[in-house]
Structure formats: C-alpha cells, structure tokens
Amino acid sequence: MKGILIPVDFSEHSEYALEVAALMAKKIEADLFILHMLGLSEAIFTKNESQEFMQAQYYMKLAKKRFDSFLDKPYTGA
C-alpha cells in the first residue's frame, strides 16, 4: 500500500503541502493520511476527569470543523 502522510496545522503552508501531496498521490495512486495533533495545556492535568473530558471533546469538535473546511478543496476529491 502506498500512502502519503501530511501533518497539518491549518495554515496556508499546510494547505499548500496538502495540494502538492494530493497531486502526487493521484500520479502514483497513493492514499493520503492527514494528521493534526492537538496540543492540550498542562493545566488540563490538574482538572478532574469530567472537566478533562469536556475540554478534550471541545477541542476535538473544533478540529473536526476545521478539517471539514480545510479538506473541502477541488484537489482533495472531498
């Protein structure tokens, strides 16, 4: 299996990297794997579990919204 991993931070540079990777993937018939890392504050470790869960859930939903618009490009086939 051929795959191309593209780490993204939703910046213009990430968008350009995604575009280039999508064009390359099309040429070599590879899959795209797009990765975004969530950076949670150290303060989250001092909260109780329910607060921790709520904050993590909030950031996951925010990332999903950003992914939806970030990936909605003609060159991604989305």
Image (cartoon, helix red, strand yellow):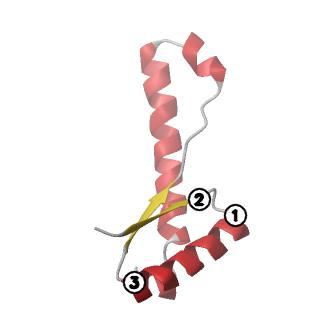
Can residue 77 be seen at all in this image of the molecule? no
Quarter holding the N terminus is: bottom left
Q: For residue 37, which quarter of the picture?
A: top right
Query: Which residue matches tag 1?
Result: 11
Which residue lies at the image location 56% right of the left edge and 73% below the top edge? 18
Say which of 29 and 58 sits in front.
29
Which residue lies at the image location 71% right of the left edge and 68% below the top edge? 13
x then y, percent, for residue 43: 65, 18
Instruction: State how far apart marks 1 and 2 are (Cα).
Output: 7 Å
Q: For residue 66, which quarter of the picture?
A: bottom right
Element carrying mark 3: helix
Kind of residue at badge 2: Val
For marks 2 and 3, the one nearer the N-term is 2
Q: For residue 12, which quarter of the picture?
A: bottom right
Can residue 17 be seen at all in this image of the molecule? yes
Element carrying mark 1: loop
